[in-house]
Amino acid sequence: MQQENRRIILFTGHFGSGKTELAINYSIKLARQGQAVTVVDLDIVNPFFRSSEVRDVLEKEGIRLLSPNFVGTTVDVPSLPPEIYSVFQSKNSKVIFDVGGDDIGATALGRYYPYFMQEPYRMFFVINARRPLSSTPEQIIEMLKAIESHSRLKVTDLINNTNLMYETNLNHLLEGQEIVEQVSEKLNIPIAYISGVAEVIEQLPEQYNKKGFPIDIYLHPPWDREDEV
């Protein structure tokens, strides 16, 4: 993992990109480096893959979680807690924003635009080139620009997280890398990481070694959870 000099880090991407999994892993890696970390869950749409679903895991790592009100209940339209504003005032903690993967999520982020303008931020755009509407450079660029437009913020880095969940192999990741490199070239946005489970990342060619970002899987849909069988 590269040294993180920014205090505010955002994870965005289309549905199924794996952005929430990346946000969770990134926050845990920072916490294990001795950093104070707060995770802000701005995903008010996706019911299955939210940072709030692993609250216990984050809290065991000493990570503070701010999530939409009524997460974990039957309320359909949660609201964002006012405590989110506090992360912009307190400068002694890294802040990870997990942003919803559509216009609604990006618009929710945009309400904090004046605060993001007060200090440098890092905004990752996570790409899974095996997902619908994310399989070509043109589709990816369209989604990226839509998120930038609604949030009024600029993507600073790309992450190749191409996967087929449990069936992912190195070829999937490398095929995705070719697509992400085209996006990077067209938009002049660097590729920060190539992410995936450790056994796949360990197989990356030497040219990509410094970009490899191994992750653990914390999120599982309800139909794949042992405790709900």
Image (cartoon, rainbow, N blue to C red):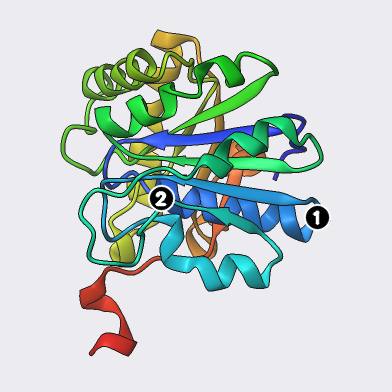
Identify which residue, 49 or 176, lies in the foreground. 49
Say whether residue 9 is visible: yes
Which one is in front in this view, the residue at disc 2 or the one at disc 1?
2
Q: Amino acid at mark 2?
A: Pro
From this viewpoint, which residue is outermost toward the left? 132
Sequence order check, earlier mark of 2 and 1: 1
Q: Which residue shows up at 26% across the image and 27% down it? A: 103
Q: Identify the residue under disc 1.
A: 33
The image's mark for residue 68 is 2
Q: Residue 148: give x, y in percent of width and height.
A: 38, 17
Residue 202 placement: quadrant: bottom right
Q: Residue at x 54, y 73 (%)?
A: 56
Q: Is 181 situated left or right of 114 in this image?
A: left
> x, y percentage for residue 185?
44, 12
Task: Residue 101 in the image: state x and y as whole percent.
Answer: 31, 37
**Pick the front one: 171 or 151:** 151
Question: What's the residue type where badge 1 is placed?
Answer: Gln
Numbered marks: total: 2
* Position of the C terminus by quadrant: bottom left
Question: Mark 2 touching mark 1, by CB under 8 A?
Answer: no
